[in-house]
Amino acid sequence: MPIVILARHGRSTANADGVLAGWSEGVGLDERGGEQAAALATRLAALPLAAVVTSPLQRCRETVQPLLDARPELPVHTDDRVGECHYGDWTGRKLADLAGEPLWKTVQQYPSGAVFPGPGGESVTAMQQRAVAAIRDWNERIERDHGPDAVYLVCSHGDIIKSVAADALGLHLDLFQRLSVEPCSVTAIRYTPLRPFLLRLGDTGEYGGLVPRPDAGAAGRGGSDAVVGGATGTT
């Protein structure tokens, strides 16, 4: 079965502002995100990609554009199922404010029981189910059209990629916050008839973010909470 390369979009304007973008319109990459997208195309240059599948959201489409410019022969598909979690009333709000909401603790400690409030709010469980279903559907399609050794790219979002990686590892969804997926990082999974193999997780090829910061507390790397939507890439 194929290898899927799950690339998170580059840093967005919402990431830089500490805002949970969700499905907000008009959220594109900031300058740093554009640089990351260009570098991603270079990092993937050696891979014989069969196709690109992308979330419909602007920040993902902008992330894959340098790759498509360099390799215009690649077929491109859009799939809503790998689009961002529907955060309902949390959409567009500051992460610093959301951290004070009672639901925040549920998302951190018991995400399988979390449902985002308001019209259209999605549960974390439903998010994982539709994302995993999408990847498995695309695995079958890519294998049928390009063979069992094909490699393809899916450009998606932090919580989506973490949930797919958790499924591949056999982790309960309540443990998926232990995973970290930075902007424009690459997570690679090879699927087989028996089990998936996680080949890369959140790899950016850049290690400056691992340097302890004096202002980040005793641990040197921030607090215990995971950032809803994925790390913002601002450190």
Image (cartoon, helix red, strand yellow):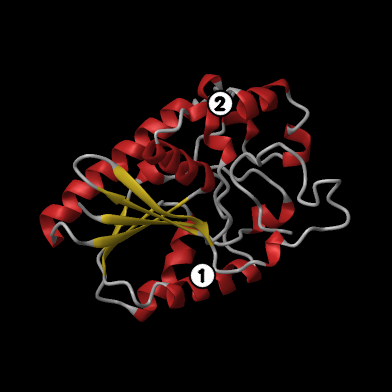
Q: Residues within 10 Å of mark 2 (few under 14, many from 20)?
A: many
The residue depicted at 74 percent of the width and 59 percent of the height is 235
Q: Is 32 displayed left or right of 153 in the figure?
A: right
Type of amino acid at the residue the image marks with label 1: Ala
Kindly indicate whether the residue at mark 1 contacts the one at mark 2 (C-beta within 8 angstroms).
no
| Residue toward you, 99 or 90 | 99
Q: Is residue 26 visible?
A: yes
Q: Could you tell me residue 174's position as x and y percent?
A: 53, 27
Q: CA distance from mark 2 to mark 1?
A: 30 Å
The disc placed on residue 37 is 1
Tell me the SS state at disc 2: helix
Whichever of labels 2 and 1 marks the residue nearer the N terminus, that label is 1
Q: Residue at x 60, y 69 (%)?
A: 206
Residue 111: give its label: 2
- Kind of element beneath mark 1: helix
Amino acid at circle 2: Pro
Q: Residue at x 36, y 34 (%)?
A: 130
Dot in front, 2 or 1 = 2
Q: How many marks?
A: 2
Crowding at dot 1, Cα within 10 Å, few <14 / some 14-19 / many 20+, comes out as many
In the displayed structure, 62 sits above or below 202; it is below
Residue 75 horizontal side relative to residue 183, left or right: left
The residue furthest bottom is 70
Residue 121 in sight from this viewpoint: no
Give the image quarter of residue 83: top left
Q: Is residue 113 left or right of residue 80?
A: right
Question: Please, is residue 70 above or below residue 93 in the view?
Answer: below
- Residue appearing at x 58%, y 36% in the figure: 177
Q: Position of residue 182 (x, y in %)?
A: 58, 55
* Horizontal and vertical percent position of residue 164: 41, 41
Q: Residue 89's spot in the image, x, y percent?
A: 62, 29
Q: Which mark is residue 228?
A: none
